[in-house]
């Protein structure tokens, strides 16, 4: 039976990661997959994480099962990180949070949950959006449509066009928004734009679904959730999928959560049973280790402040790399205006150059960039910035 299968092309992001690893050019640069890298090009384990792991190793008494929705304490600290303590208590039992295997697991869990609530639902995703949103959500059987989001000429959000399209979305459908640090374009909604989305959601009755994978990597832990909190406060229903991959550096530990806010407590009780059943049917239970690390850090004042300081350093480094890249491209004689990179947030921005230019950078210079021209700014460092900017200058000349 397996002979009937056709080989598939590599995933656009993970395939590039494998090609980079296999390249023996000493000058190679990885600006592909979204992982944070320090000034030496390493993705280190955060110190707060190391310390939490050692505490867990000493204290853990059992490896027995936890349950399909994961550890209650992890779910509580995750919700508090996203919404803040006062909003969590205000939402009370209208909120359900379930631990999930990473942000991807949370997105898929959300899709399965939505499918049960409305098998006919359409999820509206931004154009562009993260390459894995469509496979992750679409494989559950939900329909996917796009709304305009990024203007490649002005390097800004096409907010009027976005709102015009979202006028047609009604109750029973969902609008997927990036909570902060839009992946792939780095262009986020302003406070006024979040408010307008909130008003439209109230008016049209669609359900907002937020992917929050980069909290703390844009402007700050609180600043990055302005929109999430605004919507959680105002809307009767909301879905938020959060990831601990980037802000805790827990990538391979697969740590994330799905939060669903319901119109009333009794709906949330039912939602909890549906989420637990969906998790059980897919993977039974989420992995524990990453969640235990997050829980340990967030419940220890010392570890929490150490983690916060490390995260702040990561964020500041990314923001300073954005400024350096713009300045160094100019110094290298590149004519195009790249100043927009400094205005954008998080790990990613589009260079805004053609696929042919990207292919040349990958094949002739061993500079690994996704075909869309999305770069992971965190892959730049003092040792590779000269080679990177002079190579871009040569390719664009
Ligand atoms: C990315 O966008 O590069 C990351 O979120 C990693 C992934 O799984 O694609």
Image (cartoon, rainbow, N blue to C red):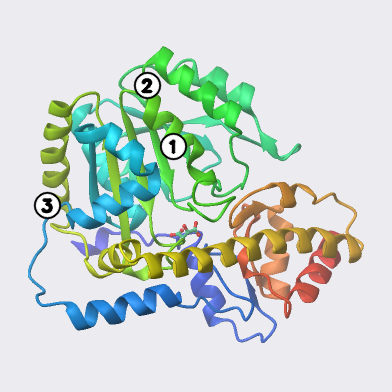
Q: Write the residue at 72% across / 51% down.
A: 341
Viewer can see residue 35: no
Query: Is the residue 197 above or below the residue 47 in the image?
Result: above
Dot 3 surroundings within 10 Å: few (below 14), some, or many (20 or more)? some
How far apart marks 2 and 1 lie (CA) works out to: 15 Å
How far apart marks 3 and 1 lie (CA) works out to: 28 Å
Percent coordinates x, y for residue 103 in the rendering? 36, 53
Please, what secondary structure does the residue beneath circle 2 have?
loop
Dot 1 surroundings within 10 Å: few (below 14), some, or many (20 or more)? many
Of callouts 2 and 3, the N-terminal one? 2
Residue, disc 2: 206
How far apart marks 2 and 3 lie (CA) works out to: 28 Å
Please, what secondary structure does the residue beneath circle 1 have?
helix
Residue, disc 3: 280
Q: Nearer the viewer, residue 48 or 272?
A: 48
Q: Quadrant of the N terminus?
A: bottom left
Q: Write the residue at 67% across / 58% down.
A: 319
Q: Is residue 18 left or right of residue 236?
A: right
Viewer can see residue 207: yes
Query: Is the residue 391 above or below the residue 259 in the image?
Result: below
Q: Nearer the viewer, residue 131 or 296?
A: 296
Residue, disc 1: 228
Q: Nearer the viewer, residue 166 or 289?
A: 289
Q: Is residue 8 left or right of residue 237?
A: right
Marks 2 and 1: which is nearer the front? 1
Percent coordinates x, y for residue 37 in the rendering? 57, 72
Query: Is the residue 173 above or below the residue 382 in the image?
Result: above
Please, what secondary structure does the residue beneath circle 3 have?
helix
Percent coordinates x, y for residue 123 in the rendering? 38, 32
């Amino acid at each position: 039976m397996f002979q009937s299968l056709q080989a598939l092309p590599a995933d656009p992001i993970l395939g590039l990661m494998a090609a980079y690893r296999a390249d023996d050019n000493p000058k190679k640069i990885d600006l592909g997959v979204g992982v944070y890298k320090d000034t030496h090009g390493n993705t280190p384990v955060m110190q707060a994480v190391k310390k939490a792991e050692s505490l867990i190793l000493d204290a853990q008494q059992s490896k027995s099962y936890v349950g399909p929705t994961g550890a209650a304490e992890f779910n509580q600290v995750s919700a508090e990180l996203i919404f803040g303590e006062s909003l969590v208590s205000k939402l009370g039992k209208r909120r359900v949070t379930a631990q999930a295997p990473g942000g991807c697991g949370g997105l898929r869990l959300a899709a399965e949950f939505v499918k049960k609530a409305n098998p006919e639902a359409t999820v509206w995703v931004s154009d562009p959006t993260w390459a894995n949103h469509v496979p992750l959500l679409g494989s559950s059987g939900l329909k996917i449509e796009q709304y305009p989001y990024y203007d490649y000429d002005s390097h800004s959000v096409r907010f009027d066009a976005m709102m015009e399209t979202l006028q047609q979305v009604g109750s029973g459908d969902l609008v997927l928004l990036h909570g902060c640090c839009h992946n792939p374009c780095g262009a986020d909604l302003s406070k006024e734009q979040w408010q307008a989305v909130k008003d439209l959601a109230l008016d049209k009755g669609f359900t907002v679904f937020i992917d929050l994978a980069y909290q703390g990597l844009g402007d700050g832990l609180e600043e990055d959730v302005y929109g999430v909190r605004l919507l959680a406060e105002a809307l009767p229903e909301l879905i938020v999928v959060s990831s601990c991959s980037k802000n805790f550096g827990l990538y391979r530990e697969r740590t994330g959560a799905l939060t669903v806010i319901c119109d009333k407590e009794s709906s949330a009780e039912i939602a909890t049973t549906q989420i637990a059943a969906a998790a059980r049917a897919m993977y039974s239970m989420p992995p524990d280790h990453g969640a235990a690390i997050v829980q340990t850090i967030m419940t220890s004042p010392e570890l929490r402040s150490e983690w916060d300081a490390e995260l702040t350093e990561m964020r500041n480094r990314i923001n300073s790399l954005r400024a350096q890249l713009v300045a160094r491209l100019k110094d290298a004689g590149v004519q195009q205006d790249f100043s927009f990179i400094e205005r954008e947030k998080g790990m990613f921005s589009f260079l805004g150059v053609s696929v042919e230019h990207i292919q040349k950078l990958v094949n002739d210079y061993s500079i690994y960039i996704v075909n869309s021209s999305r770069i992971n700014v965190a892959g730049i460092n003092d040792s590779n910035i000269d080679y990177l900017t002079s190579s871009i200058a040569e390719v664009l000349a």
